[in-house]
Amino acid sequence: MPPPAASSRYPSPSQPSGKSEVTDLKSQLRQLAGSRAPGVDDSKRDLFKKVISYMTIGIDVSSVFGEMVMCSATSDIVLKKMCYLYVGNYAKGNPDLSLLTINFLQRDCKDEDPMIRGLALRSLCSLRVPNLVEYLLGPLGSGLKDNNSYVRTIAVTGVLKLYHISASTCIDAEFPATLKSLMLHDSDAQVVANCLAALQEIWSLEASHSEEACREKESLLSKPLIYYFLNRYSYLKGRSKFQYGGVCFCRIKEFNEWAQCLILELAVKYVPSDSNDIFDIMNLLEDRLQHANGAVVLATVKVFLQLTLSMTDVHQQVYERIKSPLLTLVSSGSPEQSYAILSHLHLLVVRAPFIFASDYKHFYCQYNEPSYVKKLKLEMLTAIANESNTYEIVTELCEYAANVDIEIARESIRAVGKIALQQYDVNAIVDRLLQFLEMEKDYVTAETLVLVKDLLRKHPQWSHDCISVVGGISSKNIQEPKAKAALIWMLGEYAQDMSDAPYILENLIENWEEEHSAEVRLHLLTAAMKCFFKRAPETQKALGIALAAGIADFHQDVHDRALFYYRVLQYDVHVAERVVSPPQQAVSAFADTQSSEIKDRIFDEFNSLSVIYQKPSYIFTDKEHRGPFEFSDELGSTSITPEVSSDIVPAQQFEANDKDLLLSTDEKDDNKGLSSNNGSAYTAPYESSNISSQMQELAISGPAASATTTQSSFDFDDLLGLGLSTAPAPTPSPPLLKLNARAALDPRAFQQKWRQLPISLSQEYSVNPQGIAALTVPQSLIKHMQSHSIHCIASGGQSPNFKFFFFAQKEAEPLDYLTECIINSSSAKAQIKVKADEQSTSQAFATVFETALSKFGMP
Amino acid sequence: MEEASGRRSKLTIRSEREREREREREREQYRSSMLQCIFLLSDSGEVILEKQLTGHRVDRSICAWFWDQADSLKSLPVIASPTHYLFQIVRDGITFLACTQVEMPPLMAIEFLCRVADVLSDYLGGLNEDLVKDNFIIVYELLDEMIDNGFPLTTEPNILREMIAPPNLVSKMLSVVTGNASNVSDTLPSGTGSCVPWRPTDPKYSSNEVYVDLVEEMDAIVNRDGELVKCEIYGQVQMSSQLTGFPDLTLSFANPSVLEDMRFHPCVRFRPWESHQVLSFVPPDGQFKLMSYRVKKLKNTPLYVKPQITSDSGACRVSVLVGIRSDPGKTIESITLSFQLPHCVSSADLSSNHGTVTILSNKTCTWTIGRIPSDKTPCLSGTLALETGLERLHVYPTFKVGFKIMGIALSGLRIEKLDLKTIPPRLYKGFRAQTRAGEFDVRL
């Protein structure tokens, strides 16, 4: 009889509603316990079922432990199973009462039915009560020697369980040695597999403080042992040799699929002695690639990849060989399986981009697939796009853009953009992107704008096409901050090409108060500045308002940036321009999100969670791993001993732990955010935001009244000397001008000058037909003009419009002449604009220029 | 004297215990047993069943955490929770959730959960909350045999069947009559000891039957321009065998060269296939999937679907034509066409000249055609009204096509013969084939 006090130690079930029922059950069980009446098993079964079902729902029924054990004396196997289940669940929380169960479990371990022997042994080992380990030794020892393989299988796992309850007991009883001999000699494959699993674990844990265990652990990876395992299941293939032998055939065993995974994992760690060794293993395992179980296939793939790492040629062949089994797995399994496989394919593609290039159709999304599969497929399509398949892939992706699933539509537009950034020939893609803008769906437009912006940063030569389309988009229709920021960036960057850029910006600035996103406001400030440097008169007012609003902004960054701009402008406009609007430089490559070292680490951990998280395990296990373990135990015990406070305590613990993880996921997100910033944000604003934070001290010390800002922004006129109204008076009869043949001017200085100086002259000339003909190679004009001491600093354009910037310097005097020359080859006209340090001689320069130009094309 | 020795022993015990605890901590790090717990959740997030697999209990609160996640995270097959890594699959509204704290092959966990779902569905004759709740004892028993200490053991249905009898009408009747409701069969799990793990030892049948079914699914994508972008067949060779003793079968195809990407049941021997493209195997007992394959680059679909949508000033006209493109030689049955109306459609008025059209409240529209009549081309037509303010339709639906053709494998794969090494008395062999639409998308 169990002391009733014991049950009152665990008084209330966690759910109040269960309380009276449990008490009820308890008394009913008690009545049945001693009874030997016929039919008692039936009533017991019903009651047991009820207890288990309470347990299953989550009601704490640990209080009937004593009664359950008393009722366990039965020959009915279902009753036994239910009892084992119950005992296994509650024993850890009731170590005192567990002693009661030992007796009947030990008896069952000697039952004549091997199934009962096995089940009892399993339950006995699953009690996991440290002070009962001594009772385990006997049954385990005889279980390992049992003549039934089912019992042996369970006993082997039991040894491992014992090791985790008390390692010393397990070692002292010399179970590892027994397991080793079983592993090498047992006739049953499952026993062998379980021995391997148990020994691997025991020896690697013991290895830290026992040399012997260390040696044993190494020996698992020895050649004979590896071949022993591999051949064991290669026997199956070789079975044709034996199958007619009848008796022989029956002795040969095969590991089941899960055990195969285990052995394959072991084989991955094996260091082959030479290349023959490698080929032997690969030949042995080749048919595993066709296995119906995806886990086996993936484990085999890992073995193949790891074995051939040092053999480049073979490694490539391996990629060819594993391709089709992997693709089969993607398309034939459940979506969950596809997800796991696709994550791995992505890893392979990064290492060997060409393997799936011709199989791109495998990654086309089907309508019914869950979006997590679609997303990975889109990533795959992005990764495998190359010269040969880009057209088809982009066409396919464009179809998704009109998809009903908005998230996927967005992803696919991003994918198109990513492909555009990877490719050299983006011609067709740009057209497609611009077509998206015409779809007039706000989310499509938003995503596209962000992409166009990135594209322009890498391929500024497309600015002409893009800007004309982007210019047509009404900023009112764009709500998403990222898209808005992108549009504003383009307005600032290409202010000279978009006629109404200053006015759009002005509009946006006037609605400053309604703009909720700080990112957008930051970009507005920068864009207003850039626009100002290009088109000062039109932007001046807007810039003034923007700076005033920015300085008054409650957001620290916005405030700092506005103040910084203001001061820089006040200090020196040229410096301001150099800081805010440096000459554009195409971004050749966006920062990769992952270093190649990390990618290699993940590759080494192929077929593991690392692949799915795209992070090597040390990043996500180190921090999160240890704490939770102890924590989960605490949680377990608190839920077994339900006290009034128990509801709160685990919750808090959970929360605390949650924070821990949140922290780390935040970090992850941050990393991600940062890296994506590297990918898409502009360098200038970020730099200046850094500067602006450095300027913070200044900002505090200096009074920043917004009113004066507006005022002073008007003063910039004087600063800049932009007296546009004062038109230069052309000198009537220019003396002949001598130019310096070795003049030099760096492009930055040119740009600066070009912006500062007013146009002193603007004329149109005809170009002779020979000249037009020679213009098919624009370089020739540049050479020609150089021979006349007029140097080209920049040129561009396509037939029929060519644009050149020239400069020349007066001999003996550091006076520059800057010329913009636009030649239209179809109308054979050249338009020039001249700006000069010395306005009086600009007409003279123009004459020289015209003469030089007229000789172009002449022999 | 005695006291002193007692104290010393106490001291050593303590240091021993400390060392033990240290090792314990170490062990936690290297624990190799994989899954720690399996939960079955109902479609409302309630825990139907919980099976702890190792000494480290996983508290149920993890399920609550899981259920509270946003959909985009919750639907992922692998999730990192604050305390555990979770694997999940969803089958018929039941979520199978497994927890682990160690690095392990994710596919292994997912494959295992898939097997669990298959086995349960097989045992219970379907999967739903009530079935699991009614038979939770059996589910526990099954899980007990399928996984021990977190490592998968036996998932082969035939072997499980020998250890745990499925709940069926007969055993229920028997239990009423005899009062013995044990659903544990008397036989031993001989499969684990059997030389061919997938086959029970020596089954006996009075009549020997073996059936081979070719079941093919056509996956196709037709793009906006009406081009066939992708057209593949995913096929399975399904068998049902009730053969006495230890039969050795050989199945050969007339044209095995069309097959690609094969996957075999473990019973298939690899060498004969490699050398002569012949399937040689000792079959499991009962129903099983012998192999799966894929046939790529098909030129044609049996049906054509020609959708057209024109939209102007807030209204859309829709017309969809369906007809036979290439006659497979057998009747195409159960033709259906379903699509999701875009969100911006406020109402739809659709009718057809053949079959029935239904529009559900979630804007799913299904047109059940059945067979193509000989006298006319089935046509669905009507108008869609757009939400106010929208001029034109910018999001287009994808049409999903369904069909079934009995008696033919569209890949063209043909079975040549099925041989038995030793022919048992009263042998009956049967062959069948069918093709149905898998993922057949027509985009607009």
Image (cartoon, coloured by chain):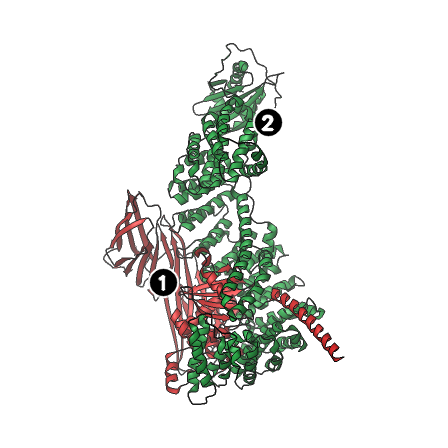
Picture residue at 37% right of the left edge, 42% below the top: A440
Q: Categorize mark 2 by other alpha carbons within 10 Å: few (<14), some (14-19), many (20+).
A: few
- The residue marked by circle 1 belongs to what chain? B
Element assignment for label 1: strand
Q: Position of residue A407 (x, y in %)?
A: 42, 50
Q: Which amino acid type is shown beneath numbered disc 2?
A: Asp
**Farthest right residue in view:** B1
Mark 2 in CB contact with mark 1 (< 8 angstroms): no
Question: Distance from label 2 to label 1 (Cα)?
Answer: 71 Å
Q: Looking at the rendering, in which quadrant would you find the C terminus of chain A?
A: top right
Give the residue number, with chain letter if any, for mark 2. A746
Q: Which chain is green?
A: A
Q: Taking A260 as reference, is A483 left or right?
A: left
Q: Which chain is red?
A: B
Q: Is residue A142 above or below residue B126?
A: below
Q: Which amino acid type is shown beneath numbered disc 1?
A: Arg
Q: Nearer the viewer, residue A118 or A764?
A: A118
Q: Position of residue B251 (x, y in %)?
A: 45, 71
Q: Nearer the viewer, residue A298 or A556?
A: A556
Mark nearest the camera among 2 and 1 is 2
Give the residue number, with chain letter if any, for mark 1. B436
Q: Is residue A66 above or below residue B259?
A: below
